[in-house]
């Protein structure tokens, strides 16, 4: 099967909006806390993906005249709640958040909502509508399926493989896995011999891959729910002398790009997190000035990155 390169061009810039809800009147908009402060709350910036969220939020927010305060919740819902309470006490104008769980984050966002502070979610959704002013996420289903096609081709449409899963509480983990398999399971020649959670973590992915290779030396492929795990898997394979393993991830990190350039990784699905974050800050500013987003839930397409187009990727930004 020839890998369909439909994503590398037009979809890099296109924004697909998943319509949910309608325009609201200015009277229905949350007023914000009264300050010119935007709180940016993300998982740990030890993952450069989340560092990009904070960097872009700061740059764009300051450009629009806001003070931006950045914090990490470390995927701890209790810590996230404390940070939202701090934002309320600080009279934040708005909150941009890459949240700590689809269900666990609802309480924190409700606190902000009750205080009149709009929350703009990036990257991860919550399992409730009507609380966040907007939920801007990468189209994980489309991206995972697209990079799975590249992997299937690299594998020659057959082989034994393993899968490293992300954090169970993160909706993205399930969506990506399901859509990897929506492509791979169409081929009779594949057999998944191991499926383990590495919780988005590079060290854990390295250790899990070491164990998988020892138990299943016959594998020729590994599919990973994000680039952090993929890079851990790549390094474990290289350290084991296994440069034949075909590996994919999702995110579009510079580290993954380097492995793609060296031939040690097949590809990744770029989540355009820089574009997503900048859009969230622009929408927050518009919201505070009386214009709500047309839809709460907004999907931004991913770009399949392989050796063919990896030179166009830098710092989570894809340029033609």
Image: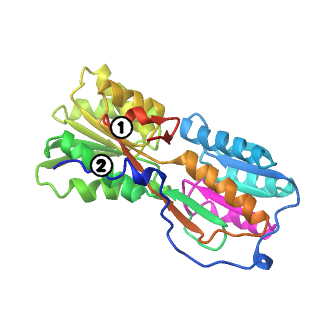
Outermost residue, right side: 34
At horizontal 32% and vertical 47% (from top left) the residue drawn is 147
Q: How would you rate the neighbour count of disc 2 (Cα within 10 Å): few for under 14, some for 14-19, many for 20 or more?
A: some
Query: What residue does disc 2 label?
Result: 5
SS at mark 2? loop
Q: Position of residue 317 (x, y in %)?
A: 51, 41
Q: Which region of the structure is painted magenta?
A: 99-125
Whether the magenta-drawn stretch holds residue 102 is answered as: yes
Q: Earlier in the sequence, mark 2 or mark 1?
A: 2
SS at mark 1? loop
Viewport quadrant of the C terminus: top left
Q: CA distance from mark 2 to mark 1?
A: 10 Å
At horizontal 36% and vertical 25% (from top left) the residue drawn is 235
In-front residue for pair 143/91: 143
Q: Position of residue 125 (x, y in %)?
A: 55, 61
Residue 108 in view here: no
In-front residue for pair 17/252: 17
Query: What residue does disc 1 label?
Result: 309
């Amino acid at each position: 099967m020839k890998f369909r390169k439909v994503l590398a061009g037009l979809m890099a810039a296109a924004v697909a909006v998943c319509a949910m809800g309608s325009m609201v009147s200015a009277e229905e908009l949350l007023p914000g806390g009264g300050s010119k402060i935007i709180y940016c709350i993300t998982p740990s910036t030890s993952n450069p993906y989340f560092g990009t969220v904070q960097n872009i939020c700061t740059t764009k927010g300051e450009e629009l005249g806001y003070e931006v305060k950045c914090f990490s919740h470390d995927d701890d819902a209790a810590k996230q709640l404390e940070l939202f309470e701090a934002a309320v006490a600080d009279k934040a104008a708005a909150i941009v958040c890459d949240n700590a769980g689809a269900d666990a984050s609802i309480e924190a966002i409700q606190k902000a909502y009750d205080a009149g502070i709009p929350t703009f979610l990036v990257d991860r959704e919550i399992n409730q509508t009507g609380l966040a002013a907007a939920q801007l996420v990468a189209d994980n289903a489309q991206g995972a399926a697209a990079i799975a096609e590249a992997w299937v081709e690299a594998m020659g449409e057959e082989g034994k493989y393993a899968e490293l899963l992300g954090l169970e509480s993160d909706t993205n983990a399930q969506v990506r896995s399901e859509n990897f398999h929506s492509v791979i399971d169409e081929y009779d020649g594949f057999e998944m011999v191991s499926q383990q959670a590495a919780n988005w973590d590079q060290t854990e992915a390295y250790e899990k891959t070491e164990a998988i290779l020892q138990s299943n030396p016959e594998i020729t492929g590994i599919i990973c729910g994000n680039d952090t795990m993929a890079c851990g898997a790549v390094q474990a394979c290289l350290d084991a002398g296994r440069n034949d393993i075909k590996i994919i991830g999702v995110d579009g990190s510079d580290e993954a790009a380097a492995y793609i350039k060296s031939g040690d990784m097949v590809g990744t699905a770029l989540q355009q997190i820089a574009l997503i974050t900048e859009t969230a800050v622009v929408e927050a500013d518009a919201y505070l000035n009386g214009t709500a987003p047309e839809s709460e839930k907004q999907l931004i397409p991913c770009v399949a990155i392989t050796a063919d187009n990896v030179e166009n990727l830098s710092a989570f930004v894809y340029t033609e």
